[in-house]
């Protein structure tokens, strides 16, 4: 007898948070970030200052990022502990330049902020489900892709958006296909508060 009915349920899912921070970003801050001293990264340019959210000029942005992190901790992670930004830096991808696939160590949640106008096309962020070497690659056929089997997922940023995602999630940025630079800010976060359980000897 043939199977007449079956069901497939999602057991787990990977969150990706996005929100608009336009209320917290001024023209003066855009100029301030764009004019930060930059140094060469592997392919793109990165600010010499790697704690830019500590600068008083960016206080309102830091506060809005913290608000997003508080939402992520309480509503997405559902935890009592809080998240706080550790390092924060600006990036410039000149035409033809993207960012190789990477993840962020010594961080719980990572994020990016598209604080000014984006080029057209804006270069997508490409998330990769795999976190380790793939000995067997079994990608779904065209037309059979779904949330369970897709190896990557692509997100297009919009001006003034903040992205938050697990620091363990591998991601890359498409090469800038426009003729103008692509500006962004990125940051890492760590957790504040108690973890684990005293009697389980997992307390921290
Ligand atoms: Fe990154």
Image (spheres, helix red, strand yellow):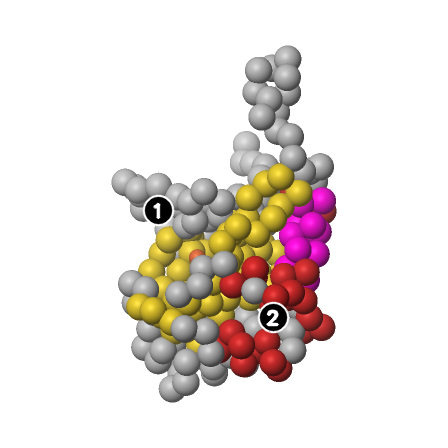
- Mark-to-mark CA distance, 2 and 1: 49 Å
Q: What kind of element bears circle 1?
A: loop
Is residue 2 placed above or below 177 in the rendered structure?
Answer: above
Of 111 and 126, which appears nearest the observer? 111
Q: Residue at x 54, y 81 (%)?
A: 31
Ligand 1 rendered quadrant: bottom left
Q: Is residue 122 visible?
A: no
Residue 138, numbered circle: 1
Q: Which residue is mark 2?
A: 57
Q: Residue furthest front?
A: 56
Residue 66 highlighted magenta (yes or no): yes
Q: Residues within 10 Å of mark 1 (few under 14, many from 20)?
A: few
Residue drawn at the location 36% of the way across and 64% of the way down: 99
Q: Quadrant of the N terminus?
A: top right
Q: Quadrant of the C terminus?
A: top right
**Residue 113 figure quarter:** bottom right
């Amino acid at each position: 007898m043939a199977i007449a009915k079956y069901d497939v349920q999602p057991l787990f899912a990977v969150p990706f948070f996005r929100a608009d921070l336009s209320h917290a970003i001024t023209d003066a801050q855009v100029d301030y970030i764009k004019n930060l001293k930059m140094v060469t990264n592997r392919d793109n340019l990165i600010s010499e200052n790697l704690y830019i959210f500590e600068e008083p000029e960016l206080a309102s942005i830091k506060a809005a990022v913290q608000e997003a992190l508080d939402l992520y901790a309480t509503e997405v992670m559902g935890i009592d502990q809080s998240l706080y930004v550790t390092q924060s830096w600006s990036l410039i991808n000149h035409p033809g330049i993207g960012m190789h696939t990477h993840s962020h160590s010594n961080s719980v949640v990572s994020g990016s902020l598209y604080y000014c106008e984006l080029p057209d096309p804006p270069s997508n962020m490409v998330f990769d489900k795999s976190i380790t070497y793939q000995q067997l690659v079994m990608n779904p056929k065209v037309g059979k892709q779904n949330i369970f089997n897709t190896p990557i997922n692509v997100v297009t940023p919009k001006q003034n958006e903040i992205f938050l995602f697990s620091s363990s999630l591998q991601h890359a940025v498409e090469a800038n296909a426009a003729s103008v630079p692509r500006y962004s800010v990125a940051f890492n976060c760590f957790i504040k508060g108690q973890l684990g359980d005293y009697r389980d000897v997992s307390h921290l």
